[in-house]
Image (cartoon, grey):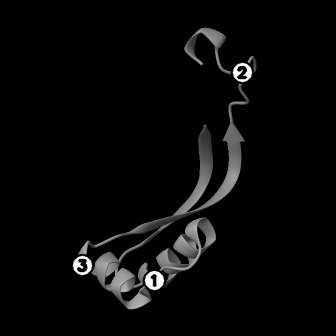
């Protein structure tokens, strides 16, 4: 898939709390949020926030049966 739109790059320390929110949305609660925040900061994790204005292409035909 291709997405066109404005992109905002969040670097540490601004990226840490949005990464917590992302983790919660995908996996639920972490057993130790302080450890998670520390790891994201130590690893220098960034977050890309994209506001889509257009996306595509729309694929047709599905996954080839021979590769399933």
Whether residue 27 sits left or right of residue 37 in the image: it is right
**Is label 3 in a helix, a strand or a loop?**
helix
Q: Is residue 30 above or below residue 34?
A: above
**Dot 3 crowding, Cα within 10 Å, few <14, some 14–19, many 20+:** few
**Dot 1 crowding, Cα within 10 Å, few <14, some 14–19, many 20+:** few
| Separation of residues labelled 2 and 3 (CA atoms) | 41 Å
For this orientation, the residue located farthest to the left is: 42
- Counting from the top left corner in percent of width and height, residue 38 is at 31, 85
Q: In the rendered structure, which disc, 1 or 2, sits on the residue that comes first in sequence?
A: 1
Q: Which residue in the protein does label 1 denote?
A: 31
**Dot 2 crowding, Cα within 10 Å, few <14, some 14–19, many 20+:** few
Closer to the observer: label 1 or label 3? 1
Whether residue 38 sits left or right of residue 57 in the image: it is left
Tell me what residue is drawn at x 55 percent, y 79 percent: 29
Do callouts 1 and 3 mark residues in contact (Cβ within 8 Å)? no
- Counting from the top left corner in percent of width and height, residue 33 is at 43, 87
Q: Is residue 41 above or below residue 60?
A: below
Q: Which residue in the protein does label 2 denote?
A: 62
Q: Which residue in the protein does label 3 denote?
A: 42
Closer to the observer: label 1 or label 2? 1
Tell me what residue is drawn at x 41 percent, y 86 percent: 32
């Amino acid at each position: 898939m291709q997405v066109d739109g404005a992109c905002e790059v969040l670097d540490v320390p601004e990226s840490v709390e949005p990464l917590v929110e992302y983790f919660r949305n995908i996996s639920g609660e972490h057993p130790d949020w302080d450890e998670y925040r520390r790891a994201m900061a130590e690893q220098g994790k960034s977050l890309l926030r994209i506001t889509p204005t257009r996306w595509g292409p729309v694929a047709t035909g599905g996954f080839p049966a021979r590769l399933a």
